[in-house]
């Protein structure tokens, strides 16, 4: 007796994929709620202090990073201070000039934009989780190339690209508003911190390749169904 075809996915694997789908959706909802709460909480704190990233171009700050105050000749932040950036930013020689401006008297828009990256990333994670839910369910049921999966994966790719571009841009826009409000924009010492990174776009391109592979699989699956 000829054995029947082996299943594409075992019952144990199907269970784990189903659990992964549920966990991913839970993480997406939690991230969206946290990002929204974080941004709204910031808006309620206006006119308290706001911290925004900028580029120091006129002088080199002292070494340090994180919340370490920096002394820059000729630069005084009204009711605030300058702080070091991340470890990859300001170094002993003022490597790339990234610093943080902490200024009092913030507006709600500044607080929202300053925390907008968390909001955008949380919503993006939720959108990606919702898009991947049907894909993971079809995989758990042994139908990875079900109709529409390629389109859903393409949505994930687009979400990765949009979030990767927009999320880091919002705090930089907040930085521009703070520089203008405090009068620091006219000193010629600051510029917006660079926001565009190619990494999210490269990841989005890779996900699009996966979407193209799934689209080819959907076409083959439809052809096979037509032969049966």
Image: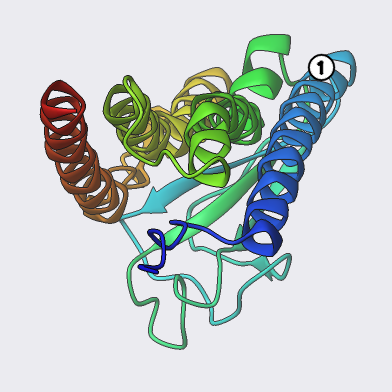
In this picture, residue 203 sits left or right of residue 28: left
Which residue is depicted at the point 80% across and 25% down?
33
Say which of 15 and 157 sits in front.
15
State whether residue 90 is above or below residue 116: below
Q: Quadrant of the C terminus?
A: top left
State whether residue 88 is above or below residue 83: below
State whether residue 77 is above or below residue 60: above
Q: Position of residue 132 (x, y in %)?
A: 51, 33
Which residue is depicted at the point 75% across and 39% down?
22
Q: Position of residue 219 (x, y in %)?
A: 12, 29
10 Å crowding of disc 1: few (<14), some (14-19), many (20+)? some
Q: Is residue 107 visible?
A: yes
Q: Quadrant of the N terminus?
A: bottom left
Q: Secondary structure at mark 1?
A: helix
Quadrant of residue 83 in the image? bottom right
Say which of 36 and 5 sits in front.
5
Say which of 50 and 2 sits in front.
2
Which residue, as the protein is rendered here, is positioned at the far bottom?
Answer: 92
Q: Which residue is mark 1?
A: 40
Q: Position of residue 7 (x, y in %)?
A: 47, 57
Quadrant of residue 51 in the image? top right
């Amino acid at each position: 007796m000829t054995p029947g075809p082996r299943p594409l996915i075992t019952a144990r694997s199907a269970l784990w994929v189903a659990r992964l789908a549920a966990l991913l959706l839970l993480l997406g909802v939690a991230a969206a709620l946290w990002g929204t709460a974080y941004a709204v909480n910031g808006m309620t704190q206006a006119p308290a202090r706001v911290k925004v990233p900028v580029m120091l171009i006129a002088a080199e700050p002292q070494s340090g990073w994180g919340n370490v105050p920096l002394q820059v000749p000729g630069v005084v932040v009204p009711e605030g201070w300058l702080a070091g950036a991340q470890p990859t930013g300001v170094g002993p020689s003022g490597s790339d000039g990234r610093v943080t401006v902490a200024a009092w008297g913030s507006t709600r828009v500044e607080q929202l934009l300053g925390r907008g990256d968390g909001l955008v990333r949380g919503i993006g994670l939720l959108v990606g989780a919702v898009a991947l839910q049907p894909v993971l369910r079809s995989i758990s049921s042994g139908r990875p190339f079900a109709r529409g999966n390629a389109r859903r994966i393409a949505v994930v790719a687009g979400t990765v690209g949009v979030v990767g571009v927009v999320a880091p841009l919002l705090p930089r826009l907040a930085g521009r508003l703070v520089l203008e409000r405090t009068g620091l924009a006219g000193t010629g010492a600051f510029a917006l911190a660079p926001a565009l990174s190619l990494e999210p776009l490269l990841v989005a391109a890779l996900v699009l390749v996966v979407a193209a592979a799934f689209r080819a699989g959907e076409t083959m699956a439809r052809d096979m169904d037509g032969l049966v």
